[in-house]
Image (cartoon, grey):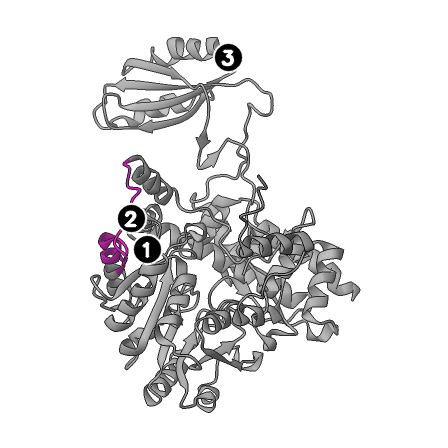
Amino acid sequence: MIDHEIIRILERDARTSPAQIAVMIGKSEEEVRKSIKHMEEAGIIRRYKAVVDWERAGVERVFAFIDVRVSPSRGVGFDDVARRIYKYPEVHSVYLVSGDYDLRVVVEGQNMREVAFFVAEKLATLDGVLSTKSSFLLKKYKDDGVTYEEPEQDDRLAVTP
Amino acid sequence: MNPNKGQSAIAKRIKSTVAEGKDMRPVSRIVQSTPPSGIRRFFDIVSTMEDVLSLGVGEPDFDTPWCVREACIYSLERGYTHYTSNYGMLELRRAISEHLYKREGLYYNPENQLLITVGVSEGMDLAMRAILNPEDEVIVPEPCFVSYQPCVLFAGGKPVSIPTCVENGFIVKPEDIRNAATTNTKAILLGYPANPTGAVAPREILEEIVSIAQEYDLYIVSDEIYGRLTYEGKHISIPTLPGAYERTILLDGFSKAYAMTGWRIGYAAGPTEVVEAMMKIHQYTIMCAPTMSQFAAIEAIRNANRECEEMVEQYNQRRRVIVKGLNDIGLPCLMPKGAFYVFPSIKHTGLSSDEFCEKLLFEEKVAVVPGNAFGKCGEGYIRCSYATSLDKINQALERMARFVARL
């Protein structure tokens, strides 16, 4: 039921139809639909969404990477603090990382003030948070495997042996 | 003083030839008698048009894996810009030797059984020049890659073409090879997986061909550039077959497996004497394959195999899409087992391959290659390449469906 080839196809283009996937991997459409449904229900496929270049869309959005040092609590480790952090809609992603800091949080806001305010008022004041270090995102080159430069053209000769 | 006074007779002749527009003496007879590639003519038409969707491209649409490009850049930064050994860098030959041993269980001594060439194209030319005497015959199953016959001709040999047909999956029948073999036959040229048909010969047939080669004491020149692009089962490398190793010149390269066409880098592996003979020609004509490409090739063969597998998975998916698409719109084709081409029949349209391709190009702006560019028996077929994005394949199929429906 878990089909890695289907996952890779959807990861590349989530809009590929089950009918097309069926042809691509040599299975029936029914089998593909079942497998996708199974993987959705099992939480393997979490969500389908568009990768948006907001800058190109003319929309101002500010991202910041906040490294957070946390004192882990008995029994739950870092999970409890992480959960308290990711519940905020402003938080784009939260990772547990190795190194000087424990959690890497990506925060999103409409402007720098909003993000700074969130960090100072919400994040830094959480129980268990010892310190934070913020870096604002200045330019996105590549995100989630997608580059943000001009789409590449096919510059091959049109007909070759 | 009259500046023309001391002019030599030759200079006068040159001057008068240019002035009167007279032709020079004709170029070599062999070159004259070799027809230009049928693909070239078609390319000239396509290149005058805009917005063409091309299924005519004989190279990967993927760019060379970044690690490979980066390794080349690094080599340039370090100033590794000099000649290498005529055989090619020993490090690269060792890497290839290890690769062949791991993948195929084949052992080629990197010292004298491997030669780094400027793509398989050069390897083919060298192989022919190394083994042929004037008038020696080479058996060439068709349809086949456009350069096989010219390579034989330029080397002074005589290509003996054997047609294959769709009923046999475009795979040569061993008995046809036997019937074509004469006392003048020197070699059999094989290219599986095949361009333009995508055919892969099964083991039994290859073994039979090898035994014919043993019987008539023939070389086998095996172009396995599409070997890694095999979709059903594992590629069978000719020299792994019983009795084949000592008479086979294996030609392979980096263009297709690692999307490195423009780097022009490949290799030949074979018996010591033949490789040495090939090296002798290579030494005088090429010196060595481009050094930066050799550095790139080392990186590719060592560290880009995951990228290769990812590309193969995508080709395989597109293969199924294009085969179903073409069959659905009434252009019957076999399921190719390798390379990135399908070879549908257009016979029932009543058009010749050339007519079909030109009409399709002018009316729907889809470029495919007439099958007859790959040999006479390719007439009535077209070659469609699926080394292009799934999106473009689907668009091209839509246009072709419209076109076929109108015929």
Mark 2–mark 1 Cα distance, whole angstroms, equals 8 Å
In front of the other: B307 or B171: B171
Q: Residue furthest right?
A: B406
Residue B83's disc number:
2
Please, is residue B260 above or below residue A55 in the view? below
Spot the residue most to the front. B1
Determine if the magenta segment contains residue B272.
no
| Secondary structure at numbered mark 2 | loop
The residue pinned by badge 3 equals: A111
Residue B10 at least partly seen: yes
Residue on which the image places disc 1: B287
User: Disc 3 sits on a residue from what chain?
Assistant: A
Secondary structure mostly seen in magenta is: loop
Mark 1 residue type: Met
* Position of residue A3 in the picture relative to residue B130 (left or right): right
Residue B17 is situated, as x and y percent measured from the top left of the image, at 63, 56
Q: CA distance from mark 2 to mark 3?
A: 57 Å
Q: Amino acid at mark 2?
A: Tyr
| Nearer the observer, A89 or B388 | B388
